[in-house]
Image (tube, rainbow, N blue to C red):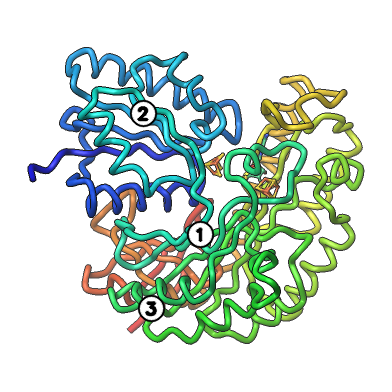
Amino acid sequence: MEQKNLAIITYGCQMNEYDSEMVAGVLQAQGGYRLIDDLEQAQVILLNTCSIREKAEQKVFSELGRLKQLKHKNPDLIIGVGGCIAQREGYRIMERSPQVDLVFGTRNIKLLPQLLAEVINKKAKIVNTEPLLEDINPTYIERKGKVKAWISIMQGCNNFCAYCVVPYTRGPQQSRPSWQIEQEVKDLAQQGFKEITLLGQNVNSYGQDLNGEIDFPDLLALLNQVEGIERIRFVTSHPKDFSERLIKAMAELPKVCESIHLPVQSGSNYIMERMNRKYRIEDYVDKVEQLRTRLPQAGITSDIIVGFPGEREEDFCQTEELIRTIEYDNIFLFKYSARPETPAASFPGQVNENIKQERFNRILSLQKSITFEKNQSLEGSVQEILVEGGSKKNPERLTGRTRNNKIVNVDGSDSLIGKKVMIKIVRAKLYSLEGQLLN
Ligand code: SAH
Ligand code: SF4
Ligand code: F3S
């Protein structure tokens, strides 16, 4: 069978990155496709979309505008849209962008070979976003790297934070059976992968839908035993389910890295309640303290939303205060974006754009100084990094991460890729560190 060229454009979170690896895997194994980068050479272009904020959606529609031109030049080009926008909008995507031939969902990627064959052979337009809930075991995955791999341990989310579309785009929480995950990790170890990152919208509630057979700390203990895997990471942790048991697991399991993404969203209990986050700031601070007592070197990052409906100056100041108290290694900062269907979109007290921008800027500069100071405090220290590959900016240099997830660039030979090495931190930058290899 003649191979067809497939290009995939991915937006959004790690979950989407992983899903795109699955799209590539399934279509190579069962559809006769070859993955390429050059859109001009592609016979099929698939967009794996994100709908978390309005801007993320706009990006996709402007890309679809560019692809329309491409389809003008090459009328046989097939354009497909999947991911979170597709799941929510379905056929409305085709109404808005008639150049789209196929719309597929976040939970039916396995159907793609069949769906694309129909589109091509019958010259049909297809919308199928029906989730396949019975079997969530991903089959073929064409991974991007050779050292680090993503692994989805669960689908969906049951939390319904008032601002968030994810429960609507990814459906209810569904944990993968632990033996499937373990098998996937063993396969990865055999293929030479050294680091895995377990993915879920809220990994701390892993297993809650599996009749209490296993919880997240147990899963970590299980995977810690897989020979060949050297580092284990996970995202994202919801603070309400972040437990002492997990802190203990992080402290006791040697492969689990001292790094956690624990999104707080805001520093105000009033906003927390309106967001439906189900924890109080005091408890959050308390948990972080417990973690730091057991693991003083732990890297801690967070997500912050400014300008959530009803956010008063005093609430915002509490967020600033919290950031000063915790001293995150880094944060991902967002301006609240009203999403259709979510409760917060119709809350009173929507904050105007100027105030959002002003609050955004204030937090950004505060966090920048904290991040930089934290990085500077590492100058002169010796750290273990796992070498991942060539650095983004300069492929001649190597890049890796410390156990607590700081990016380090260092001179060295390609033969070190996939190895753990000791380096001395010689200079701190804002978002990375410069290191020197130690023998
Ligand atoms: N499941 C993860 C995060 C998923 S979305 C968790 O609960 O932490 C990633 C981040 O996007 C969220 O943590 C939040 O900070 C941000 N986000 C989600 N919806 C948003 C919205 N409507 N406007 C602005 N930021 C949003
Ligand atoms: Fe969205 Fe909240 Fe679920 Fe995270 S936990 S995906 S923010 S609803
Ligand atoms: Fe975006 Fe969907 Fe991820 S909305 S952030 S791609 S779960």
Q: Whole-Å distance between the Cαs marked 3 and 1?
A: 36 Å
Secondary structure of the residue carrying numbered label 2: strand
213 vs 52, nearest the viewer: 213
Q: Nearer the viewer, mark 2 or mark 3?
A: 2
The amino acid pointed to by label 2 is Leu
The numbered mark, 2 or 1, whose residue comes first in the sequence reads 2
Residue at the extreme left = 2
Horizontal and vertical percent for residue 153? Answer: 53, 64
Q: Residue at x 29, y 59 (%)?
A: 390
What residue is pinned by disc 3? 186
Q: Is mark 2 within 8 Å of ligand 3?
A: no
Q: Residues within 10 Å of mark 1 (few under 14, many from 20)?
A: many
What residue is pinned by disc 1? 428
Horizontal and vertical percent for residue 67? Answer: 31, 21
What residue is pinned by disc 2? 102
429 vs 203, nearest the viewer: 203
The amino acid pointed to by label 3 is Lys
Q: Nearer the viewer, mark 2 or mark 1?
A: 2
The numbered mark, 3 or 1, whose residue comes first in the sequence reads 3
Q: Whole-Å distance between the Cαs marked 2 and 3?
A: 35 Å
Q: Is mark 1 within 8 Å of ligand 1?
A: no
Secondary structure of the residue carrying numbered label 1: strand
Q: Looking at the picture, does residue 371 appear above or below residue 108?
A: below
Q: Looking at the picture, does residue 169 appear above or below residue 416?
A: above
Q: Whole-Å distance between the Cαs marked 2 and 1?
A: 47 Å
Q: Are marks 3 and 1 in contact (CB under 8 Å)?
A: no
